RNA sequence: CGGGGCGUAGCGCAGUCUGGUGAGCGCGCUUGGUUCGGGACCAAGAGGUCGGAGGUUCGAAUCCUCUCGCCCCGACCA
């Protein structure tokens, strides 16, 4: 058992921060709410980025970069947008030793600048669609920062597209939501619920917001990514018009969608344990570590190390060069070396001691379950990738089982309230309430509607208003 | 931003109420030795302007004022 980590059951928040510290994922920066993403954390982000970036390109998107600073007036062009974001904007008022004529906002999101540029680039229906993504940092001065989940500055990806028809824009919104779901499930092992946000939870300025909601280890909900159908709201605000095939001027239909470094927080909170970080193999910078173990220096240098090098070499061919590490920390005792990699979340550990060498096997130990076994030398390049796949799938399956076990159905207010108080987790209920109802529910239970799951199209009587033909919603306390 | 807690070595803490002779303890770190397949042991060391600024006092980690930061609970949110 780890002695430098608060047990998860004792204090989930402390545990979460301890895991980040011990695994060296991030550290606090000198500026409030800001974090330094350390090399290990950044490597995880790069792995995540790669999957998303490839998928964006496969779906026809291209990357570009828009500026960090946005004229204050841009934000004000969309009424709901400014209302939603103005309170959390950092604003530059001075530059070059002088006060600026117009304050510049550090982007909290880029719909406005991009809208401005799109209005210049789009004239004809032939210019559409525009499918651009950018990888960037944004800044939102949140009241209560928390490493990875909510920092003042964070890294993300924001896709911004413009289309000539409503149907096409809607299709794009849902296509990217599905891309998100697929990568979150397949690569981050995060089982998510795709759903539509309620009016009260919508992105400021959006016509409709879709989300991938996940449940983390303390049964709270976390919005892992969102995809917004912006209708013509931003097109009107920024005058994004095009001439259609009939020669008439029309406003474009736009979308935006994003995932952020919050995903790293979601992975930590979903999969890790009291010993530290557990990473799904597909996003683990180091997928497997090979440890020659021995005290006899001759045995080490003549047999164990050369064999370990050979095995590591074979594995690198299968898994990729940087994801296999040969541990040479011989100044440390074996147990310390085990913990070193354990706490950093390396999915699979391979040990090669004299006993193993004599048998012609390596000993494997799974990070997620602690399961051990022996692999004959010659099968290592075949078995290790299989094991990593199994770990990947079982991590996902466990997280999904956890969510299902902590999801319940409520048909009345009393039941709803009791479930949230006594069990926590997700509570499903038919809901047809207003934004005011959402607020009241939050005040009385702490829970918010997370989404209307797309997969469930059933209708029923609203648990709150009694209205018929209400959609099924998921409620939970959320990060 | 409101309520509560807390800042003393890299980490965790004692000391603060009741100011007073060396600023201590555990873990970690360095060096040497014995150990070595799930967090060893012995010995010798290094490491602090007690979060910061100002004040009271002969004297401040300790008392007062201001300030910064962290954690928890709310409101705001990717």
Image (cartoon, grey):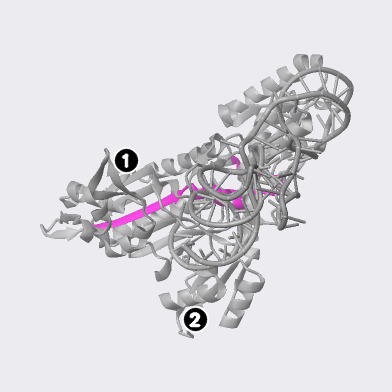
Residue A169 in the image: above or below residue A435: above
The reply to the same-chain question for discs 2 and 1 is yes
Task: Please report, as a chain letter, where disc 2 is located.
Answer: A
Point out the frontmost of discs 2 and 1: 1
Query: In the structure shown, which secondary structural element does the residue marked by tag 1 occupy?
Result: loop
Q: Residue at x 33, y 63 (%)?
A: A83
The magenta span reads: A252-281
Report x, y in % for residue A172: 35, 55
When asked about the image quadrant of residue B31, the answer is: top right
Mark linked to residue A65: 1
When asked about the image quadrant of residue A419, the answer is: bottom right
Pointer 2 residue: A462
Report x, y in % for residue B54: 51, 46
Asked if one can make out residue A351 in the rendered structure from this viewpoint, the answer is yes
Viewer-nearest residue: A182 or A104: A104
Asked if one can make out residue A347 in the rendered structure from this viewpoint, the answer is no
Callouts 2 and 1 close, C-beta under 8 Å: no
Q: Residue at x 32, y 44 (%)?
A: A68
Report x, y in % for residue B47: 67, 30
Q: For mark 2, does the 10 Å Cα neighbourhood hold few (<14), some (14 to 19), or many (20 or more) residues?
A: many
Q: Residue furthest left?
A: A247
Q: Separation of disc 2 and disc 1 at Cα?
A: 45 Å
Residue A72 in the image: above or below residue A380: below
Q: Is residue A272 magenta?
A: yes
């Amino acid at each position: 058992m780890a002695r430098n980590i608060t047990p998860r059951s004792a204090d989930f928040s402390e545990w979460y921060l301890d895991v980040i510290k011990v695994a060296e994922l991030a550290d606090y920066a000198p500026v409030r709410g800001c974090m330094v993403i350390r090399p290990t954390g950044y490597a995880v982000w790069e792995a995540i980025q790669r999957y998303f970036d490839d998928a964006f390109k496969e779906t026809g998107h291209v990357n570009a970069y828009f500026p960090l600073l946005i004229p204050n007036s841009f934000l004000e062009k969309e009424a709901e947008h400014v209302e939603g974001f103005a309170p959390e904007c950092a604003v530059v008022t001075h530059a070059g030793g002088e006060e600026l004529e117009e304050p510049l906002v550090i982007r909290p999101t880029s719909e406005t600048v991009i809208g401005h540029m799109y209005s210049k680039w789009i004239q004809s229906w032939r210019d559409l669609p525009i499918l651009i993504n950018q990888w960037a940092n944004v800044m939102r001065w949140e009241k209560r920062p928390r490493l990875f989940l909510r920092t003042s500055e964070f890294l993300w990806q924001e896709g911004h597209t413009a289309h000539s028809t409503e149907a096409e824009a809607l299709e794009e919104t849902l296509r990217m939501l599905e891309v998100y779901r697929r990568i979150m499930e397949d690569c981050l092992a995060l089982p998510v619920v795709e759903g539509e946000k309620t009016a009260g939870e919508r992105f400021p300025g959006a016509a409709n917001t879709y989300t991938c909601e996940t449940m983390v280890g303390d049964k709270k909900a976390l919005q892992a990514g969102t995809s917004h159908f912006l209708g013509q709201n931003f097109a009107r605000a920024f005058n994004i018009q095009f001439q259609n095939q009939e020669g008439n001027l029309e406003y474009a239909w736009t979308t935006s969608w994003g995932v952020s470094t919050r995903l790293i927080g979601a992975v930590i909170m979903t999969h890790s344990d009291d010993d530290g970080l557990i990473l799904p193999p597909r996003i683990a910078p180091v997928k497997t570590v090979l440890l020659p173990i021995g005290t006899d220096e001759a045995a080490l240098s003549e047999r164990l190390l050369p064999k370990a090098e050979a095995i590591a070499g074979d594995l690198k061919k299968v898994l990729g060069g940087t994801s296999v590490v040969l541990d040479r920390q011989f100044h440390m005792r074996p147990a310390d070396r085990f913990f070193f990699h354990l706490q950093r979340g390396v999915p699979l550990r391979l040990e090669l001691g004299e006993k193993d060498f004599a048998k012609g096997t390596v000993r494997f130990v799974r990070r997620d379950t602690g399961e051990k076994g022996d692999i004959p030398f010659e099968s290592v390049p075949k078995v290790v990738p299989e094991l990593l796949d199994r770990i990947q799938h079982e991590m996902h399956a466990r997280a999904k089982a956890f969510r299902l076990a902590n999801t319940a159905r409520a048909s009345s207010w009393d039941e709803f309230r009791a479930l949230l108080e006594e069990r926590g987790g997700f509570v499903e209920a038919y809901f047809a309430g207003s934004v005011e109802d959402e607020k009241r529910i939050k005040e009385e239970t702490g829970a918010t509607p997370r989404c209307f799951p797309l997969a469930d199209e059933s209708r029923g009587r609203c648990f709150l208003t009694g209205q018929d033909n209400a959609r099924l919603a998921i409620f939970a306390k959320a990060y």
